[in-house]
């Protein structure tokens, strides 16, 4: 609606009747406990309603679109400002909606259209085409009634045109809308979600081309930059100047000034970008240099310079120690991802890694290193890297750029002998033939380390004997692989999983010797015979220590009672008896009376080569066995009338309360 309006539209509201799409219920009353009137609206029938019921707390309305609000005795639709005048049982609602208007004195040229459009969203209602008309009032005015249906807009409307305002006023007084200063159209059925739009235009037959430039009714930056047009004006910049000529657009200015300004803007932008990039690169260089210096510090601290010097003087290059960089091992383990951990204990953590050449390796990340033992550590790394034995886990190299050196070994992927014997996941019947082969391979590696490599092993146990795909034994965790200080080695050896393998002589002398390794291997042999753990707190006192229980059973001629059930048969009786006697010799209390690792190797290899035959407990075998057994037992009974055969067992009992942690 434009400059002039009909009398019934003076309040800028118009009455609109809408039809309820859904059928109303037959009942004309509101729900129990719900208001049934508001101000002049005397009847609010269900499914309409206000709020919730005071009786049962349920909604007074059927659906959200039928929710009404009563504010200051005035009924509104929902929480909005659409006033409802009446609700009939015939399914019609009378409501007031805002009109659309535009003032002609706001028009400077061309067409003026209202910005914000009054609208009414009625997804559940349709505008009644019988009770409503769409009316446009004013001179040189047109109005639109827009609707949206399924995302598509459609419109209807009409246009008025007149030469004078008096014609409109006369029609307004008569109350008729005949087309002069006022027009109306029928509303199409089924319109929903409507909006009103009013516009006005210049009628050049009824108004004169106003001199906006002369009268200073323009938006140009200067009158000289304003040009009159038919019914309007335009801003421009004369030759030699650039710009749009408007006040808002910055007006007109010379090209040199514009170019200079543009250059300043571009220069400032490029400068800021260059400054940001420079600062960023300086930061990266600083961080890179910081990391580099830290790596250098660790490399020197861990004996890297010593290792390089010794490697450069070596004539034999057949077994080269690789010095890995930290980034290479970090990439190989996906930044030491926990999902790649294959071993964990008091000594540190072992990760599975894949090098850039696709070689699978085991990377040991220790917890601590004794700086006073760096020289010894470097010497052992060089020695260990030269070891080339099929039953020894190969040390491929190390990384010295980290706080604690990383050791890189060949990857052995079938677990440990301890897991194979004791863990529930491997509770399969391991044949005696396989056990004897594994024992022979392991002791051959230990003998090699003792004699050829002169490596102090110090930690022989089934969890340090790895198995490859063919169940070939490979000895690991020896020499520099622990990387713990000497004073901590003693504690680690007792506490971290070696309980039950420890040489009883160590309890008195605090010295670990090659014969200590022999004793520990004797425990390994007993594990292979019995498939029992070296020490179990959950067993009876006489059976807690596997070695004590084994030796007592052997002395009392009850060896077969302590063997694993089902292991013994007619073909392996002799071999099992010989291995049991060898284990007993390895377990003698006095280290000097134990065989050397080389002698143990020769005996096991001899047992393997012996032709299979039925073992008969002849007098000779019995006498030899008894002699060896009593000789073994005598080492536990050095003149003490009360006997000291339980020295080892008693010493173990003293450590029953030690916390083992989760180490190997």
Image (cartoon, grey):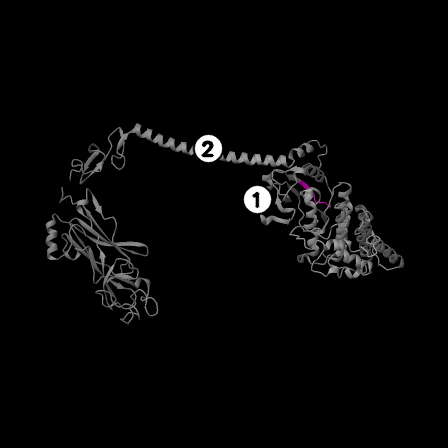
Q: Give me the disc on residue 492.
A: none
Is residue 392 shown in magenta? Answer: yes
Label 1 to label 2: alpha-carbon separation? 29 Å
Where is residue 62? Give x, y as percent.
32, 66
**Label 2's element?**
helix
**Quarter-wise, where is residue 427 in the image?**
bottom right
Where is residue 514? Give x, y as percent.
77, 45
User: Considering only vertical position in the picture, is 501 above or below 452?
Assistant: below
Tell me what residue is drawn at x 58 percent, y 48 percent: 338
**Quarter-wise, where is residue 87 in the image?**
bottom left
Name the magenta segment's main secondary structure.
loop
Where is residue 225? Give x, y as percent.
22, 33
Label 1 crowding class (10 Å Cα cut-off): few <14, some 14-19, many 20+? few
Closer to the camera in the image, 4 or 455 = 455
Is residue 79 shown in magenta? Answer: no
Which residue appears farthest toward the right when viewing the image? 619
Tell me what residue is drawn at x 62 percent, y 46 percent: 351
Which contiguous range is marked in magenta?
Answer: 391-396
Instruction: Say whether marks 1 and 2 touch (CB < 8 Å).
Output: no
**Quarter-wise, where is residue 235 in the image?**
top left
Q: How many marks?
A: 2
Quickly name the residue at label 1: 335
Label 2 crowding class (10 Å Cα cut-off): few <14, some 14-19, many 20+? few
Residue 466: tell me if it is visible.
no
Where is residue 635? Give x, y as percent.
83, 52
- Along the horizontal axis of the image, is 531 left or right of 297? right
User: Considering only vertical position in the picture, is 157 above or below 296?
Assistant: below
Residue 110: tell me if it is visible.
yes
User: Considering only vertical position in the picture, is 64 above or below 312?
Assistant: below
- Along the horizontal axis of the image, is 575 left or right of 311? right
**Among the two numbered marks 1 and 2 on one chain, the one whose residue lies closer to the N terminus:** 2
Quickly name the residue at label 2: 278
């Amino acid at each position: 609606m434009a400059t002039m309006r009909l009398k019934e539209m003076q309040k800028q509201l118009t009455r609109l009747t809408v039809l309820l799409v859904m059928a109303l219920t037959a009942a004309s009353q509101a729900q129990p406990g719900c208001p049934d009137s508001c101000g002049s609206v005397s009847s609010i029938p269900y499914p309409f309603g206000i709020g919730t019921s005071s009786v049962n707390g349920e909604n007074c309305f059927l659906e959200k679109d039928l929710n009404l609000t009563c504010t200051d005795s005035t009924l509104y639709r929902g929480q909005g400002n659409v006033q409802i005048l009446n609700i009939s049982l015939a399914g019609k609602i009378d409501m007031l909606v805002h009109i659309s208007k535009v003032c002609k004195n706001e028009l400077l040229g061309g067409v003026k259209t209202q910005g914000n459009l009054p609208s009414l969203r009625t997804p559940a209602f349709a505008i009644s085409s019988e009770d409503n008309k769409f009316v446009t009032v004013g001179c040189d005015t047109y109005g639109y009634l827009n609707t949206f249906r399924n995302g598509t807009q459609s419109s209807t409307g009409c246009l008025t045109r007149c030469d004078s305002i008096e014609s409109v006023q006369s029609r307004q007084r008569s109350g008729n809308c005949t087309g002069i200063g006022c027009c109306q159209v029928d509303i199409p059925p089924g319109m929903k979600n409507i909006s009103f739009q009013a516009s006005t235009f210049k009628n050049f037959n009824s108004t004169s081309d106003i001199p906006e430039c002369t009268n200073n009714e323009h938006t140009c930056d200067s009158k000289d930059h304003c040009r009159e047009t038919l019914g309007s004006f335009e801003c421009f910049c004369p030759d030699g100047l650039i710009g749009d000529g408007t006040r808002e657009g910055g007006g007109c200015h010379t090209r040199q000034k514009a170019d200079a300004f543009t250059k300043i803007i571009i220069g400032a932008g490029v400068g800021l970008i260059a400054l940001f990039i420079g600062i960023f690169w300086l930061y990266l260089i600083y961080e890179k240099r910081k990391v580099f210096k830290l790596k250098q510090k660790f490399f020197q601290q861990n004996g890297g310079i010593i290792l390089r010097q010794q490697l450069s003087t070596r004539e034999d290059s057949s077994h080269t120690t690789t010095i890995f960089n930290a980034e290479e091992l970090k990439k190989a383990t996906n930044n030491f991802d926990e999902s790649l951990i294959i071993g964990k204990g008091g000594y540190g953590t072992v990760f599975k890694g894949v090098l850039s050449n696709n070689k699978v390796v085991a990377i040991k990340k220790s917890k601590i290193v004794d700086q006073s033992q760096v020289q010894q550590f470097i010497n052992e790394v060089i020695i260990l890297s030269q070891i080339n034995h099929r039953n020894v886990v190969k040390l491929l190299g190390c990384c010295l750029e980290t706080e604690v050196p990383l050791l890189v070994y060949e990857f052995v992927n079938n677990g440990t002998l301890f897991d194979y014997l004791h863990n529930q996941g491997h509770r399969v019947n391991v044949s005696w033939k396989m056990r004897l082969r594994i024992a022979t391979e392991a002791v051959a590696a230990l003998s090699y380390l003792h004699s050829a490599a002169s490596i102090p092993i110090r930690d022989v146990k089934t969890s340090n004997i790895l198995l490859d795909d063919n169940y070939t034994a490979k000895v690991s965790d020896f020499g520099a692989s622990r990387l713990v200080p000497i004073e901590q080695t003693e504690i680690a050896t007792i506490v971290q999983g070696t309980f039950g393998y420890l040489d009883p002589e160590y309890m008195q002398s605090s010295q670990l010797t090659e014969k200590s390794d022999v004793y520990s291997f004797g425990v390994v042999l007993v594990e292979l015979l019995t498939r029992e753990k070296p020490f179990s707190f959950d067993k009876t006192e006489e059976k807690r220590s596997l070695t004590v229980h084994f030796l007592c059973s052997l002395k009392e001629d009850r060896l077969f009672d302590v063997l694993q059930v089902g292991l013994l048969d007619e073909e392996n009786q002799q071999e099992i008896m010989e291995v049991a006697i060898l284990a007993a010799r390895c377990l003698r209390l006095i280290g000097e009376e134990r065989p050397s690792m080389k002698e143990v190797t020769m005996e096991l290899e001899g047992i393997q080569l012996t032709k299979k035959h039925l073992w008969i407990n002849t007098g000779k075998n019995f006498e030899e066995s008894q002699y060896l057994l009593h000789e073994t037992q005598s080492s536990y009974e050095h003149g003490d009338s009360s006997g000291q055969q339980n020295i080892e067992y008693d010493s173990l009992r003293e450590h029953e309360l030690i916390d083992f942690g989760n180490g190997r």
